[in-house]
Image: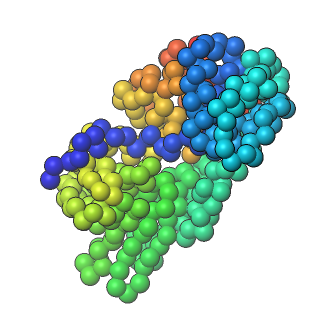
């Protein structure tokens, strides 16, 4: 079956899109740098005007840092509001001490936002926390390994064996049961385990499948079906399927506590690291596209960041234990 355009090049490391609050933090740090030209100011204005949520996020960040902001309770956003907000906030004069002092509050705000977004994770049958990988036994004797910040519902009865991956990634070691094939479901579709080992990752609007033993059958919500042979993997969305590939097995390295990347953008590396760190880890847009090659230990994220800073033209700034920014050197 022909894969959808672009799906084959997608990466499981892209993670979720930044929230409005995280974007506001990025803008605040950029404005604080003192190197803001007309283009950057216009881009900031466009972002601020694009959504009421952006305005509210800017207000939260500004208040966390002790700045005055324009009240945002009006339903209509006047055209002059971004200029006024910039003048009142005056982030160009924001000191490093003020930024450090507010970083804990910023991280707390973002963490609260993330918790609200993923609160159902804690209602799942199987789950892991930050920087935690854990192996569970299923009712039939199968084993499932969860990556950090993952959540799975177990749906076993006399007629079926099912797992629903809410978030994160799992690796299944299945026992044979011809009458009840093991099936892993995600928001985008279902994967039937045909062998003994399979990895599935829930991404942002798409799912990654890696057939580590024998094979698998993938069916998305649109009813499209793709068979995978041993060693093949693909990404699929609810309405399209990617082509099977044999160069995706590095994406299962988390099972051994490693992050293996071959010529991938820095932004993807950062996204893969986030489940292994508390707080906020942000990468500046100007360095997000830098290419990375290497193998890194996931369980020592500070060491990983140090390695990146030694090999790339970047600077890792620790505003606190809960707020880390990766910027151009």
Q: Residue at x 60, y 68 (%)?
A: 123
At x 68%, y 48%, the residue is 75
Indicate the position of residue 221 as horizontal and vertical percent values: 31, 64
In this view, 284 is above or below 197 = above
Horizontal and vertical percent for residue 228?
21, 55
The residue depicted at 49 percent of the width and 65 percent of the height is 152
The residue positioned 82% from the left and 30% from the top of the image is 67
Q: Image quadrant of residue 122?
A: bottom right
| Coloration of the structure image | rainbow
Q: Residue furthest bottom?
A: 158
Comparing 31 with 213, the one in front is 31
Please state if 202 lies on the left or on the right of 30 as rendered.
left
Name the one closer to the observer, 62 or 281.
Answer: 62
On the picture, is 329 further left or further right than 70? left
- Residue furthest left as drawn: 1
Image coordinates of residue 190 in percent, x first then y, are 33, 65
């Amino acid at each position: 079956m022909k894969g959808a355009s672009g799906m084959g090049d997608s990466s499981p490391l892209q993670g979720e899109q930044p929230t409005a609050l995280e974007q506001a933090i990025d803008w605040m740090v950029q404005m604080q740098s003192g190197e803001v030209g007309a283009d950057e100011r216009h881009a900031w204005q466009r972002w601020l005007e694009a959504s009421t949520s952006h305005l509210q996020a800017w207000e939260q960040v500004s208040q966390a840092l002790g700045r005055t902001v324009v009240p945002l309770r009006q339903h209509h956003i006047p055209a002059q509001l971004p200029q006024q907000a910039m003048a009142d906030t005056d982030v160009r004069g924001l000191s490093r001490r003020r930024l450090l002092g507010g970083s804990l509050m910023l991280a707390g705000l973002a963490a609260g936002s993330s918790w609200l977004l993923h609160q159902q994770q804690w209602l799942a049958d199987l789950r892991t926390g930050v920087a935690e990988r854990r192996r569970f036994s299923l009712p039939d004797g199968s084993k499932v390994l969860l990556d950090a910040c993952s959540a799975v519902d177990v749906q076993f009865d006399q007629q079926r064996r099912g797992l629903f991956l809410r978030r994160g990634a799992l690796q299944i070691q299945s026992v044979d049961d011809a009458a009840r094939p093991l099936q892993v479901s995600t928001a985008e579709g279902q994967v039937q385990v045909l062998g003994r080992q399979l990895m599935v990752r829930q991404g942002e609007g798409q799912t990654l499948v890696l057939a580590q033993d024998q094979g698998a059958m993938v069916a998305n919500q649109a009813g499209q079906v793709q068979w995978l042979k041993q060693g093949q993997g693909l990404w699929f969305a609810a309405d399209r399927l990617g082509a099977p590939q044999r160069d995706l097995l590095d994406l299962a390295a988390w099972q051994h506590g490693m992050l293996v990347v071959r010529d991938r953008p820095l932004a993807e590396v950062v996204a893969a690291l986030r489940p292994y760190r508390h707080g906020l880890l942000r990468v500046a847009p100007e360095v997000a596209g830098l290419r990375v090659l290497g193998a890194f230990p996931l369980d020592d994220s500070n060491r990983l960041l140090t390695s990146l800073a030694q090999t790339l033209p970047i600077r890792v700034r620790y505003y606190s234990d809960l707020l880390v920014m990766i910027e151009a050197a």
